């Protein structure tokens, strides 16, 4: 669908908020905290941005875009081209980071990772759950929505690194009571540090993460050839050791949406009918990997000689 930019403002140094709406006035798709949209910047350039407004607002989507000078160019293009009245193609919303019901939450955010957390905090407030937010960034001026969040009171801790140093994760995690769910989003060093401490404290079952980049891959064996069967037609395709499932599907005219091609964004997820996926993404939980009923075809491979996938030629995914 095409959405038009109806609002733009600076919310931190290098971060703009965009408000998007439909031109025909119809309601936008329902979404829940943790959801993101696929923002199609240009041909072959797709970026994911978390929705940070209110799910109750069916007229607008709000996203915040950090200008990443060392990135692949998508955010720089958005900062340059997304002005009031500009139109962009958008897909979704989709949710790989859903907020689960709980009596208690600990939210940890780093930098632009605050965006999916904002509607989660609002939902926790609305449900009368116990919650806390620890929000870190390089400098106060680089931390989007810091002032708005501080208005929620002492449950919010804003910790710019140039003033307070690194986040005291040990202190905040030591206060987690039984049943607390921990939601964390931010740069990879923060996520790795939270994972390490949660593992030591036996809190991994309570931890929910959303990554901007792929986790460090586990060193394994040599990649081998395998086959992919198209579930609807029975056609069998060969996937060489040096190519991805995504590449092979595209060769055969299957239009699979993708963006990161690192197993982070979830846009290339495809249902698995049979076979054993070799999951290499940074999205699925251990339980979802064990179920083996879906996979990210940009990075994941097969442990069995053949995988059957729920796709057919000419079918956009």
Image: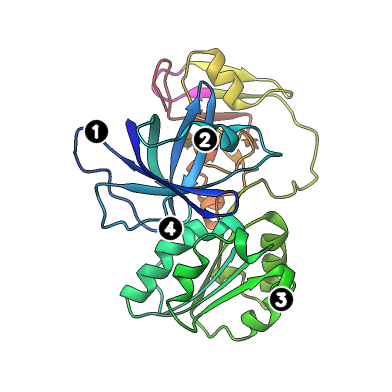
Q: Which residue is mark 3?
A: 164
Of callouts 1 and 4, the N-terminal one: 1
Which quadrant of the structure image shows residue 128? bottom left
Q: Residue at x 41, y 51 (%)?
A: 51
Q: Confirm or deny contact between disc 2 and disc 1 (CB under 8 A).
A: no
Q: Confirm or deny contact between disc 1 and disc 4 (CB under 8 A).
A: no
Work out whether residue 226 or residue 15 is closer to the camera in this orientation and state it.
15
Work out whether residue 256 or residue 161 is closer to the camera in this orientation and state it.
161
State the separation of the CA atoms marked 2 and 3.
32 Å
Q: Secondary structure at mark 4?
A: loop
Q: Secondary structure at mark 2?
A: helix
State the separation of the CA atoms marked 2 and 4.
26 Å
State the separation of the CA atoms marked 3 and 1.
45 Å
Q: Which residue is mark 4?
A: 98
Of callouts 2 and 1, the N-terminal one: 1
Whether residue 273 appears in this view of the structure is: yes
Q: Which residue is mark 2?
A: 78
Task: Residue 19: give x, y in percent of width and height.
Answer: 37, 45
State the separation of the CA atoms marked 2 and 1.
20 Å
What range of the chain is rendered magenta?
229-234
* Front disc: 3 or 4: 3
Q: Is residue 234 left or right of residue 74?
A: left
């Amino acid at each position: 669908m095409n959405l038009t930019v109806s609002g733009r403002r600076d919310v931190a140094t290098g971060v703009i908020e965009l408000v998007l709406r439909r031109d025909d006035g119809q309601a936008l798709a329902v979404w829940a905290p943790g959801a993101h949209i696929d923002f199609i910047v240009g041909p072959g350039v797709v970026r994911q941005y978390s929705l940070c407004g209110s799910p109750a607002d069916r007229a607008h989507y709000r996203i915040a875009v950090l200008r990443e000078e060392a990135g692949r160019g998508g955010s720089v293009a958005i900062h340059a081209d997304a002005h009031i009245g500009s139109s962009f193609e958008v897909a979704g919303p989709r949710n790989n980071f859903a907020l689960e019901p709980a009596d208690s939450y600990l939210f940890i955010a780093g930098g632009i990772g605050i965006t999916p957390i904002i509607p989660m905090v609002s939902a926790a407030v609305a449900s009368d759950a116990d919650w806390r937010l620890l929000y870190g960034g390089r400098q106060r001026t680089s931390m989007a929505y810091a002032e708005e969040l501080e208005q929620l009171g002492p449950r919010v801790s804003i910790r710019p690194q140039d003033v307070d140093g690194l986040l005291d994760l040990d202190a905040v995690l030591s206060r987690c009571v039984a049943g607390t769910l921990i939601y964390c989003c931010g740069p990879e060093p923060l996520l790795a540090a939270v994972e390490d401490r949660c593992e030591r404290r036996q809190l991994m079952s309570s931890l929910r993460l959303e990554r901007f980049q792929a986790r460090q891959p586990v060193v394994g064996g040599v990649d081998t050839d395998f086959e992919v069967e198209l579930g609807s037609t029975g056609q069998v395709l060969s996937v060489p050791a040096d190519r991805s499932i995504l590449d092979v599907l595209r060769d055969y005219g299957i239009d699979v949406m993708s963006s990161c091609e690192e197993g982070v964004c979830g846009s290339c997820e495809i249902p698995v009918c049979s076979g054993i996926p070799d999951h290499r993404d940074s999205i699925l939980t251990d339980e979802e990997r064990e179920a083996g009923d879906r996979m990210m075809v940009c990075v994941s491979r097969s442990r069995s000689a053949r995988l059957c996938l729920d796709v057919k030629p000419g079918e956009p995914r």
